[in-house]
Amino acid sequence: MKRKPIVAANWKMNGTLDQAASLVSGLLPLLKNSAGHVQVVVCPPFTALARVSELLKGSAVELGAQNIHWEAQGAFTGEVSGLMLKDFGCRWAIVGHSERRQHFSESDAVIQKKVKAALAAGLNAILCVGETLQQRQADKTWEVIETQLKGGLDGMDAKTAAARLVIAYEPVWAIGTGLNATPAQAQQVHASIRNWLRTRFDGPTADSIRIQYGGSVKPDNAQELMSETDVDGALVGGASLDAKSFASIVESTAQAKEQGCSTH
């Protein structure tokens, strides 16, 4: 099955309102040639969602959030619910990013609740999985990823997964370090994830779910990574803070998939 690639920008905790507006305003004209071939999502900080949402109106670029709380409302000081995100115009929520797991002690059980909350609010979920350097060196890469997949997707049915789930493989050792998995390393893990999805759901569902790569994706390595059969796009961190760099990654993804792979 052919899959339309998806490239998402995770700005993390960066950008004032003016900086966010400037970045989006500079980005949109650069995406005109590739937007039809690649699904593009921008995930600013909560504080910039309203401003960015306004700027994205009329474009093909979709809005996403970097996090979500597992309840729809209530006494959860400082949290933001799926219903609130939907109100901003969000269509996506990133769940289980390694920085949430590491710095905020999010367990697989918490991440599962967040995935369910995103779906219940009518959002699509980008579920992040990945191993640390120590886990890779101990040859536990797949053990870790399988545990994260089982936890995050517990209770999800095939129809929902096929329609509203994206998985992002992000080797923790390659995030913000300047290191990145080789295309072969990325493909090996992505293929293993797809095989697991085939067992967890079924063949057609596994073939339809898109699996992004995240981990120091840059303009100079994007096309090589995106050329791999089971790499269906990218979750981009630092490089997404520069309009030209991010647009270049989107364009490289479009070119790679037009030459060898996908449209969904």
Image (tube, rainbow, N blue to C red):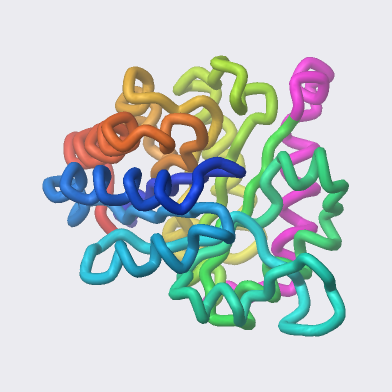
Residue 35 position, x and y percent, is: 21, 52
Rendered residue at 52%/29% (across/down): 186
Residue 203 can be seen in this image: no
Q: Main secondary structure of the magenta part?
A: helix
Q: In this view, does 127 lie above or below 250?
A: below
- Answer left or right for 165 relative to 183: right
The reply to whether the magenta stretch includes residue 143 is yes
Q: Position of residue 142 (x, y in %)?
A: 73, 35
Q: How many labels does the image show?
A: 0
Q: What stretch is highlighted in magenta?
A: 132-159
- Placement of 185 over or under 144, stated as above or below: above
Q: Depth check: give the residue in front, 152 or 162.
A: 152
Q: Which of 209 and 42 is in front in this view?
A: 42
Task: Tell me residue 51's x, y (percent).
Answer: 41, 63
Quarter placement of the N terminus: bottom left
- Quadrant of residue 221 in the image? top left
Please name the residue shown 73% across and 32% down the image.
Answer: 131
Q: In this view, does 72 lie to the left or right of 203?
A: right
Q: In which quarter of the image is residue 23?
A: top left
The answer, for residue 155, to whether it is visible in the render is yes
Residue 183 lies within the magenta run: no
Q: Quadrant of the C terminus?
A: bottom left
Q: In this view, does 120 lie above or below 173?
A: below
Left or right: where does residue 37 sit relative to residue 242? left
Tell which of 18 and 83 is nearer to you. Answer: 18
- Give the residue drawn at x 36%, y 52%: 21
Residue nearest the observer in this picture, 165 or 214:
214
Residue that protrudes farthest toward the left in the picture: 33
Please report the residue visible at 76 percent of the width from the left and 27 percent of the height from the top: 132
